[in-house]
Image: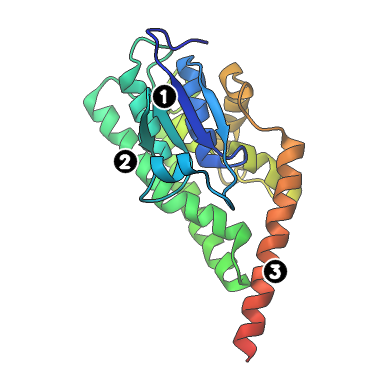
Amino acid sequence: MATGGGDELKLLGLWASPYVLRAKFALSFKGLSYETIEEDLTNKSELLLRSNPVHKKVPVLIHNGKPICESQIIVEYLDEAFPGAGASLLPSDPYDRAVARFWAAYINDKFMPAWQKASLGLTEEEKAEAMKQMLVAIENLETAFKECSKGKPFFGGDTAGYLDVTLGAVVGWARAGEVLFGRKLFDATTSPLLEAWMERFVALDAVKAVLPDNGELIEYGKMRIAHYERLAAALAAANKK
């Protein structure tokens, strides 16, 4: 894979982050080469703090020395900055592009926060409420897939595109979650279209090239769960005082 034209791309990230994975998917589908710089989020590098001084979060894409922050913005930037590379991610039709951006915002604002809290909330009540919100979001995304795909394999139609990359950010943890939590994110009963979509998406070469190892995610997930359990125990103890 090559950027061509002397472009230099660096990606500041954390291997297990779904948001970093989203950026990696975009780079992979565009066929772009890049340098990965792994961050320790407990000891953030000067490069990260200088590149993203507002949020101080990953991912950050650095293109010829210029930083681009936020995973969704990175996906759009790559599609616009490298129009001749790989597949076009955003739909060409303005209306379809607007619809895709609407659902991308829904995924980021509604689905992903609920998805994360449903597993890692600090109280059982928080987890239960998040689970309700997540199920509503999945129902809406099932409808979105039906409307956007128009009967084809992906949100983007015959090939994976912008929304596939956006929702695809969760597929690594969705697979790990089946082991960690004993439940599927998408299933044949409540979300058969999304279940089939995920199977097709993870089978793509561009996805397999950057998808984290499932066993490593499971082990990392166990550590994160233990961390949140300690936080929950500390919160419960504080509330009893």
* Occupied quadrant, residue 195: top right
**Residue 139, percent across and down?**
48, 48
**Residue 90, percent across and down?**
34, 24
Query: In front of the other: label 1 or label 3?
Result: 3
Q: Earlier in the sequence, mark 2 or mark 3?
A: 2
Q: Is residue 153 above or below residue 105?
A: above
Q: Residue at x 57, y 46 (%)?
A: 190
Q: How is the image coloured?
A: rainbow
Give the secondary structure at mark 2: helix
Give the amino acid at mark 1: Gly
* Circle 2 residues within 10 Å: few <14, some 14–19, many ≥20: few
19 or 132, which is in the foreground?
19
The mark found on residue 230 in the picture is 3
Q: Earlier in the sequence, mark 1 or mark 2?
A: 2
Q: Residue at x 49, y 30 (%)?
A: 11
Can residue 148 be seen by looking at this rendering? no
**Residue 94, percent across and down?**
22, 26
Q: Is residue 90 above or below residue 185?
A: above
Can residue 235 be seen by looking at this rendering? yes
Residue 215 placement, left or right of 43: right
Give the secondary structure at mark 1: loop
Q: Earlier in the sequence, mark 1 or mark 3?
A: 1
Measured in 3D between alpha carbons, the distance from the residue under mark 2 to the one under mark 3, in whole angstroms, is: 37 Å
155 or 173, which is in the foreground?
173
Give the amino acid at mark 2: Phe
The mark found on residue 12 in the picture is none
Per the image, the residue denoted by label 2 is 102
Per the image, the residue denoted by label 1 is 156
Query: In front of the other: label 2 or label 3?
Result: 3
Give the secondary structure at mark 3: helix
Decide: marks 1, 2 in contact (CB < 8 A)?
Answer: no
Q: Residue at x 53, y 37 (%)?
A: 13
